[in-house]
Structure formats: structure tokens, C-alpha cells
Image (tube, coloured by chain):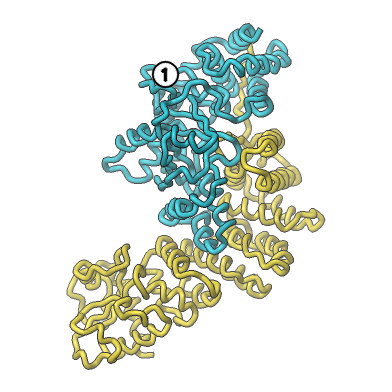
Chain colours: A yellow, B cyan
Amino acid sequence: VTTQSTQEPKTFAEAVATLPVRAIRRFVVDAVLFIDRYSQSETGSEERLKLVLEMSEQLRPIPFPSRLEPRASITAAWREATSLAETKFFEAVDALLRDEDGHWAARQVSALLELLAESGVVVPSATVFLAQGRLKADYDRWGNPGPLSALMAMVPNDATSIFSMLDRLDADGMLAPAAVQAGVRKVCKWEPESLERSLALFGHQLFPEEEEPDAVRFFLEDLIERAGSASVVLAITGIDPDISPKLVSAAFGGDGAPFGLVLEFDGEESDIESDTSVLEGTRILSLHQLGEAAREPEWTLKVRLLSAAKPLVKIVETNPSGGVDFDEQYDEILEHAEVSGTPLTAEPSDEHESFASQFAQKMQLRVLA
Amino acid sequence: MGFDRLLAHDRAKILLVNLAETQRRKLLPKTLRKPVLKEIHKGLAALGTRPTPEEILQVFKNVVFRSATRLQAKGVERPADDTTLAAVVSFDKVRGLLEKVLFRRPDLKSQIDAIIAPDAPDATVSKAAGIINRHSPRMSTLSLSEWGTIFWAAPTEEIDRLLSICAAGSNPMQVARFLRDSLGLIHMKFDLTHPDRHLFLFRAKASIANIVADEDFIVTRPTTLDGWDNPRFCQPLLPPAPFQDGCGMTVDIADYKCSPGAAEVVCSALPIKFFDISYLGPVDKSSFGSDSDFVDLIREGQDLNDLVDYLSALAA
């Protein structure tokens, strides 16, 4: 009769907890080299199968089920390892990045960073700085922004650390849009109250010159999903539009913009600038109704003029299809924001009141400006 | 006991029970049946009279990887030609596809970076489906199976049946979990804060016959040699399994169940251009329940050594 095993197989995390840092480092090196070779091999090739077999023996006890991509097996194991033996695991990564004699190609350093980022672990700032140092030569030579978003994903989840990393990248001439976007996304998720500051500080390098409007819109929608509409609209209206005209335009201008600037007039139409005749007979409109001009950065100037001329300027979310359902939105306006100081006609919740109050403050400043 | 923590003894036994059933029902082609069995027997014989469960597992792994079987769909039974297929996959495969898209379309970097960010919101991750759908027709080499040469699927009508069961009042998380459990996807045991918890549905746009007309495509009922590394893979059909011709049957891994899940097949790798991709949702529960019933089922069967002997006799 076969003796039944009474011990559960050890997991990678359990192994990390008992192994010396040097051995953990070897594990990390082997995993990175494996993934590097794997990614260079052909899908479904003999070489790829051999690599997985080799790795499943070499990296035991990490399991490599055939229905899961090997890199997912590795990142899951790393994630578990950091939850059980975080200090030792990071010591191993740190030691690895300090080793200048490792003869690792930039591609392999990138693979390490991408695996760490995919693991969803955040590493100490000092280790991220080390990683950034290892990438610099490659960036200077090739300008490859590929691993920068992975680098930012590893930064601790607080605005100070994120800004510090972006500052460092800036100082080293590595502040590529990919890094700024990753940083802003992260701020948005973990510290949305610092979003405006992040845009003010780094927004000028948020998008490359040639960035398509669709990509900007995609980025904006991601921010809204992360931080909520109120935080995003407050942050964008808080910065100088010249910092990131693309972002401001994506937020308020054109069809499909997530926000519409809604103007309400209770004065005479003659008070309005002549080129805004589109307003004729309209009490509420979204910015895209201003026409082509609204797609340009100058629209903000028009809005300022309109704001100064008229008492009420409000921002609401447009519906997902991009248009504004006025009947539905009007109720929402009354709930959301009252900029002129006129009492609200609907009872606001505390949350809305706070939003209205902050928003009113910002818009008043704009009007005064 | 969770099935992911099965003892090597149980896993080895499941493998041997499955292999015995595969042989008994002649689910492998003649050309493969004997050689594979001989190879496994040779591996087991080399272990001596008292092989450990770990050694038995290793023999299987070696045979599957090194022999002529490799990771290809090998069964002899196959579903009807007019069947269409669908596969539920996790984000780890979708990420790979996005990176391939990015290689060809570097202008999509900011969008793809947002989707693969470790803390990406659900709504952002869901946009991966649209990006791949838009670009897959021009990416004929992009495959659903990255490292092996097979992928697992179910008849589309089976997936629709499952979706209809959980449609009323279910949120995306419940739908994703229900499909994960019904399809017995034990490898989808994710950290609930990690992007890999997101599930996607790949629906083939054409029937098997139409795909075969265009591709060197094989689809068969799964055998032990396909499901060797899944300790939940059960070759014998669990009663009262509603049997679908040419298909195997998953074992439902939902809490406290040990029942048939859904019809399933295994296929050769297929270019992404054949699929429409949609987002299902994130799995909201990382664990599945006790599998004690299933383990009991296995433990009540023959002894491990008896199984080894039985297979040796078959191979002789």
C-alpha cells in the first residue's frame, strides 16, 4: 500500500518564508529569464513547451497549470509571497537591482518590472528608484517608454511617493506621457483629493502631441471610473486650461464628452456675445452646442466671458451616449450645483452640498478672474 | 477541504482512475492508446514497487510533455459539426492579446496601459473586449492558447444555458462566479484585488464545420491526457450527467456540490479572428467550497497500487 502523503505541498510563499534572501533572488532571476525566453519563443512551439516543463521543475513549488498563462502563475506566486514574507521578497528584488554585474539586458529589467507590476505589489520607494536607475541608460538611448508605466505601478500608493517618482523622472529626462498617465491614474485611485495637484504639476506632459482624441477620452473615462465624476470635474476645472487643453477639451468639448457645461440664462439675449447665437431661445445647453469652437482650447475663454456676463454656470455629466437629456439633466443640475449663490430649489444631500459648495467656490474664482 | 489543496495521493489517484476510464472506453485513437499507456507504464515501473504519489504525478507530466501526445486534442469522440463553441477565459490571457495588439498598434499604448494597470477599474478592464474585437480580424496568428496548442471550450448553447440560469437579478460578479464554478475552472482562484479575476467570454462566430473548412482545427471530447494537470478533471461521467454527444462533462465546483457542471470540449489553438469577445465580470469569490464528496468518490475507488497494477496489465 502506498504511503499517503500527510504533508500539504509547500507553496512558493511558504518556501520564500523559509529560504535565505539569496535563494529567493535566484527564484526571481530564474522566473524573469524564463519569461524573457518564453516571450521570445513562438506560440505553441516545441521550445515553449520545453521551457514550461523546465520551469515547472526549476521553480517548484510554483504550479504551472496548462490552462493558465505561465506569467500569471508566477505573478500569483509573487503576490502570495509578498503577503507572507514581504520584507525578504523585497530584499531579494532590491539586491537583484543593485547588482550591476548581473549583465541583464534592459529587456530583462523591463520583464522584471512588468512581472512585479502585474503581481500588483508595491515596493519601497528606494527599490523603485533603483529600478528607474537601471532603465535610464536604455531610455536615454532608445526613448522606450514601455516599462515606465510598470515602474509607476510599483510606486507606493500615496501622492507624495508618486509625485516624488515623477519629479525624479522629470529630472532625469524620462517624464514620458506613459509615466505621467500611470502616475495620475494612481493618484486618482488612491488619493483623488490630490488629482488637481497632479494635473497642475504634470499635466503639461500628460499626452504626446499626436495623441488622438479617442485616447484622451479613454483616459478621462478611466479617471472618472477611478475617482468619481465630482473629483475629476473639480480637478479639471481647477487647473489652468493651458496645462492640458486636450484633457479639458475631452472633458467638456464635443460630442460624447463626459461632462457638459450647462449655462442657464435669466437675462437678455443681447447680453451674450454675438457668436453664441446658438444660445438663442435656449435656457440650458451643453458646451458642444457652441459648435466647432467648443472643440478648441479657446472655448474656455468664451465660457469665461459667458460666466462673467451671466449669473449661472453649471457643470453636469452628460449621458453615456454623449448628448444631454435636458429634462433629466435639469433635475440633476438643481441637485448638484448652484453656482450663483441662489438658493437651490431642491433639497441637496450632504454629498451634493459639499460638491456644490466646492464647485461654486471654484467657479466664482473663475468668474472673478 | 478545498480541491486546490488536494493531497498528492488524491491527485495521483484521480489521474489513474481517469486514465483507466480513458482506456476502458477507448477514448484515445488506436495509434495513441497503446504507446501512451506503455510510456506511462514504463515511467511507473521505473519507480519501483511503491511509487509515491508525487512520482506518479511527475510521470504523467513527463509523458504529456515529452511524448507524442504533447498538448494536442487527442480524443476520438467529437461534437456535431454544426456546434458552435465558446470559451470562458480570465484576464491573464486577454492581457497577452492586448500586448500583441499593442505591438502592432503602438498608438493604443495609453488605452492598453490603462486596462492592464493592476488597479484598473472594472469598467476600464471591460473595454479590452472592444479593442481586441476591433483588431483581431487583422491578427490571424493571434491565438487563444498562448503556450500550449489547445484550449478548452463548451458548446455555445451550453454557455447560453448557464447564462440563462443566472440571468435574473444577477450582477456581473455573480455571473462570472457562476460560470467559473459550473465550468469547473479551478485554476481561476484569484486574489480578488487582482485584474486576473476578470472573466471574458470568447464566442466562436462560425460552427465547427465552417472553421474546419478554413483551418486545421481539431475539437474532441477531453481525455486524461488533456486534463492531466487539473485535479478536478473527471473522466467518468458523474451520474446523472446529461450527456451531450462528443463532449465531456465538467464537475461543478460551487460550494458543497459534487455534481455535473456543463458539457465541455478541448480544441486545437484557434486564431482570435474566429471569436467575438465580451466581458463577463470579475469573480467575486476566490475560493470554492468543500470537495469532500468528490474526494470521497475517488477514495472509495480502488487503491492507488491496484490502479497502477491495473494499468500495468493493460499495457502489457
Q: In this view, does A322 lie above or below B308?
A: below
Q: Which residue lies furthest to the front in this view?
A: B213
Disc 1 secondary structure class: loop
Counting other residues with Cα less than 10 Å from the Cα at mark 1, is it few (<14), some (14-19), or many (20 or more)? some
Horizontal side, residue A96 vs residue A124: left or right: right
Q: Where is residue A79 in the image (x, y as percent from the top left)?
A: 58, 46
**Location of residue B268 with respect to A305 vertically, above or below:** above
Question: Which residue does the numbered mark 1 point to in the structure image?
Answer: B238
- Residue A206 appears in the picture as rendered: no
Amino acid type, residue under disc 1 in the picture? Leu
Q: Can residue B104 be seen in this view?
A: yes
Q: From the viewer's perspective, is A46 left or right of B159? A: right
> Residue A239 placed where, x, y %?
45, 79
**Chain holding disc 1:** B
Q: Is residue B203 shown left or right of residue B100?
A: left
Quadrant of the rendered structure where residue A129 is?
Answer: bottom right
| Residue A229 position by quadrant | bottom left
* Viewport quadrant of the C terminus of chain B: top right
Q: Quadrant of residue A365?
A: bottom left
- Looking at the picture, tell me which residue is in the foreground, B126 or A8: B126
Which residue is found at the position 60% from the left and 8% from the top?
B310
Q: Which residue is drawn at 39% across and 24% down?
A: B260
